[in-house]
Image (cartoon, rainbow, N blue to C red):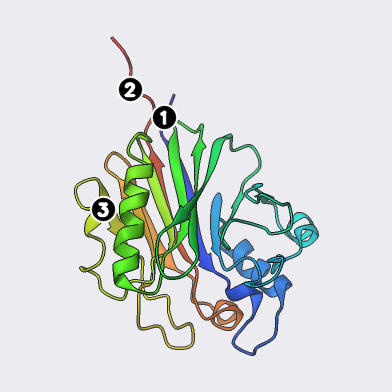
Amino acid sequence: MSDAGLRFASYNIRKARGLDNKRKPERTLQVINGLNADIVVLQEADRRHGARKPAIPRRLIETETDLDLLDLTEKGVSLGWHGNAVLVRPGLKVGAIDRLDLPGLEPRGAVRMTFDVAGGFCLVATHLGLRRRDRRAQLEVLRHATQDCGHTVMAGDFNEWSRRKGLEALDGRFQVHAPGRSFHARRPIAALDRFAISHGLSFDDGGVEDGTLARRASDHLPIWADIVVPPKASIC
């Protein structure tokens, strides 16, 4: 089995509401299509209150993209879990999916799933809290939840303005990559959106999609990363 190079993307879509205050799911999907990613992690993919209806109708994902929506919801209404949704290229084999509640002042969550690609890996999709004390506690939970995963990619809106503080729970096992400034889309000054990859995975390239459409579609710009998953080790 050979290495697998995959493009990951993370995008806080702000419930598909752009900087013009218009909710345009089709515009959001245009931006997503332009990322050419194999796996796309979304934040704020569902409305915040009530039944948490999806910000993007499922039928539009089916008709306007070449991606499959993973079933992460408990009740079948939302696109995801705590607003975290995941789109994948057809053919990528997904194994176990676990929904995680995260501690903190605000309701927050994450989704952990396994992929049977090359040597296999776990993906964690998350949207961390606004307070650093909560983010630290949330990352401790995620580190513990992935301790038996082997290769792991965490992706999402980390909500951390500092490049050094607040991420201590990941030290020693993960390398954190901020491909660029992704917030605020109108004038990006902070790298809030990030990837954290465990040792053994290779970060080949990454960036921020800052085209005209992306600058209008949300208050965050999407980020992407090309990551290589090694094959399973041979047993002599």
Q: Earlier in the sequence, mark 3 or mark 2?
A: 3
Q: Is residue 32 above or below residue 218?
A: above
Amino acid at pointer 2 = Ala
* Distance from Cα at disc 3 to Cα at disc 2: 25 Å
Q: Is residue 175 left or right of residue 215?
A: left
Looking at the rendered image, the quarter that the N terminus falls into is: top left
Numbered tag placed on residue 83 in the rendering? none
Query: Are the residues tagged 2 and 1 within 8 Å (C-beta)?
Result: yes
Instruction: Report the residue marked by disc 2.
Output: 233
Residue at 54%, 50% (x, y): give it. 39
Using the rendered image of the protein, determine whether residue 203 is visible from the camera's viewpoint: no
Residue in front for this viewpoint, 102 or 220: 102
Q: Earlier in the sequence, mark 2 or mark 1?
A: 1
Residue in front for this viewpoint, 234 or 126: 126
Q: Earlier in the sequence, mark 3 or mark 1?
A: 1
Instruction: Report the residue marked by disc 1.
Output: 119
Residue at 36%, 65% (x, y): give it. 179
Residue in front for this viewpoint, 119 or 130: 130
* Distance from Cα at disc 2 to Cα at disc 1: 8 Å
Mark 3 crowdedness (10 Å alpha carbons): few <14, some 14-19, many ≥20: some
Using the rendered image of the protein, determine whether residue 50 is visible from the camera's viewpoint: yes
Amino acid at pointer 3 = Leu
